[in-house]
Amino acid sequence: MQKTLDSQTFKTCDAASYNALTEQFDFFTERLSSSLAARMVSLAEIGSPHSVLDVGTGTGVVALQAAGKIGAGGKVHGIDLSEEMLATAAAKAERLGLAGKIEFSRMDAEELKFEAQTFDIALSLFALLHFPNPLMALREIFRVLRPGGRLVVAVGSSPPLISLSGLIHRFKILPDLLRRSQGKQLVAPNFLDSLVERHLPETDEPEESHLASHSHNRTQGVAALVQSAGFKVLQTDWQGHQAQLETPEEFWEIQRTFSSIARKRLAAAAPEKVELLEREFTEKCRTVQSRGGNLVYPFAAFYVVAQKPE
Ligand SMILES: C[S@@+](CC[C@H](N)C(=O)[O-])C[C@H]1O[C@@H](n2cnc3c(N)ncnc32)[C@H](O)[C@@H]1O
């Protein structure tokens, strides 16, 4: 059921929900999303001396790769609402010797504190679905891009209904569907989400934005939003991936970090309830593994490359 969204409450809760899990978030993001960040940077055609904005930067996986590509005089600015994510991103920039080329600020994507036409390029990976009003965020990005500036935005989504990549994907997962029907595969985040839905009551706080909960296929909706904000869509692309987790502990960690429903409901639950749930989770994983089965986390990105008209 879709709860009424008080957007300010939603934003505060969403950002805060990452604070206690920043280390895990960064670990899994570096492992899973580095190649996706590289694809974003390549689609953006970053050169020097570009000025780049990364919206919903998290621990900076995209911003840091962009900073690595930018020549002398270029600058990257990553914004997010989570203090802990930003602190981790800044520490990574320092470690990588990129601190001079990159800045991180706490800022709401729906209310950017930049002058109009400040940036040449805007990037945003896996963040749009977290905004209660994604169109407002896209309009803000449009405002702060210079005419001719490029946007590359990517969201998690099932494949476009009619597409070659979708067709190939559906063909490739046939063996997985068989394994699942034989009880030889557990799939994240549905596995933990279903246990959480069964054992833990919904909290009063909204767990997902309307765009995220509306449908798993966000391809048409996101491209339409980008257009509504004033951009010309140049290219779209969907790519699916799958990570295999070796242990039930890792499988638990990745889901409670990346699933908004699990992250928020587990954080609000009594520790003894979480412990019981984790025990049931682990036992089911072990049973599947003892049959020769595996634990998988499928994930996908739908990329939209767009331009602000000259
Ligand atoms: C799934 S994470 C993606 C982070 C990063 N782009 C990545 O791919 O690793 C979503 C991020 O959006 C941030 N976020 C949520 N609402 C926001 C808002 N209104 N303005 C800016 N950032 C927001 C969250 O704090 C979180 O860091």
Image: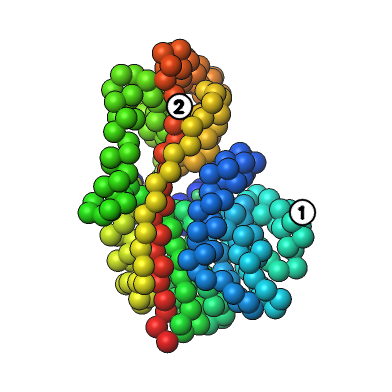
Q: Which residue is mark 1?
A: 95
Q: In the rendered view, does 79 fall on the left or right side of 281?
A: right
The relative height of residue 213 versus residue 55 in the rendered view (above or below) is above
Mark positioned earlier in the residue sequence (1 or 2): 1
Q: Amino acid at mark 2?
A: Leu
Numbered circles on residues, count = 2
Does residue 108 appear in the picture of this structure? Answer: no
Query: The C terminus lies in which quarter of the figure?
Result: bottom left
Does residue 142 appear in the picture of this structure? Answer: yes
Residue displayed at 32% across by 72% down: 228
Percent x, y of residue 202: 39, 34
Residue at the limit of the structure toward the left, as seen here: 162
Q: In the rendered view, does 249 fall on the left or right side of 230?
A: right
Q: Which residue is mark 2?
A: 295
| Marks 1/2: CA–CA distance | 33 Å
Asked whether 23 or 3 is in front, the reply is 23
For disc 1, the neighbor class at 10 Å (few under 14, some 14 to 19, many from 20) is few
For disc 2, the neighbor class at 10 Å (few under 14, some 14 to 19, many from 20) is many
Q: How is the image coloured?
A: rainbow
Q: Secondary structure at mark 2?
A: strand
Q: In the rendered view, does 224 fall on the left or right side of 43?
A: left
Asked whether 299 or 103 is in front, the reply is 299
Q: In the rendered view, does 14 fall on the left or right side of 132?
A: right
Residue displayed at 44% across by 35% down: 297
Percent x, y of residue 1: 29, 41
Q: Secondary structure at mark 1?
A: helix
Residue displayed at 49% across by 32% down: 244
Q: Amino acid at mark 1?
A: Arg
Percent x, y of residue 21: 60, 40
The relative height of residue 123 versus residue 148 in the rendered view (above or below) is above
Asked whether 95 or 77 is in front, the reply is 95
Mark 1 residue CB less than 8 A from any atom of ligand 1: no
